[in-house]
Image (spheres, rainbow, N blue to C red):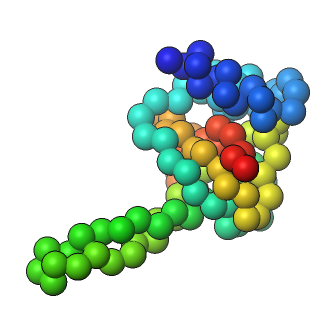
Amino acid sequence: MAEEQKKEVIGNAVSDCKDLKCPVHGSVKVRGNMFEGIAIRAKAPKTVIVERYLMQHVRKYERYKKVRSRITAHKPDCIQVAIGDKVRIGETRKLSKTKSFVVMEVLK
């Protein structure tokens, strides 16, 4: 299964990179949850903040409300992410204090 994920990522990866936390060229394994969202901030080096919206059911009022979720993810050197790009992120081991996700590919 991990090999299938890497085949998808290789299409967006620029070339060989030396980032050890890269899911394609490094030693980090992607396992667990995978999300799609919009990259809203990419100011810090090798870090991108991905935002996604969910519909949450409120039982008391029998309605749905829109909930925003912001996830901090690692951006490898071989994947170019700009603000406003739709990206797919995957869960990994803890990479730093706030990052436990890595950008796998940029979607159209």
- Farthest residue, direction left: 60
Give x and y (percent) for residue 95: 57, 40
Closer-to-camera residue (104/73): 104
Left or right for 104, reference 82: left
Could you tell me how many numbered marks the image carries? 0
For the question of whether residue 96 can be seen, the reply is no
Could you say which quadrant of the image residue 89 lies in? top right
Left or right for 75, reference 5: right
Q: Residue at x 60, y 45 (%)?
A: 88
Give x and y (percent) for residue 72: 58, 56
Q: Is residue 10 above or below residue 38?
A: above
Give x and y (percent) for residue 71: 53, 58
Q: Residue at x 78, y 52 (%)?
A: 81
Closer-to-camera residue (64/38): 64
Closer-to-camera residue (84/92): 84
Give x and y (percent) for residue 25: 74, 23
Could you say which quadrant of the image residue 13 lies in? top right
Q: Residue at x 86, y 24 (%)?
A: 16
For the question of whether residue 89 can be seen, the reply is yes
Q: Is residue 58 above or below residue 81?
A: below
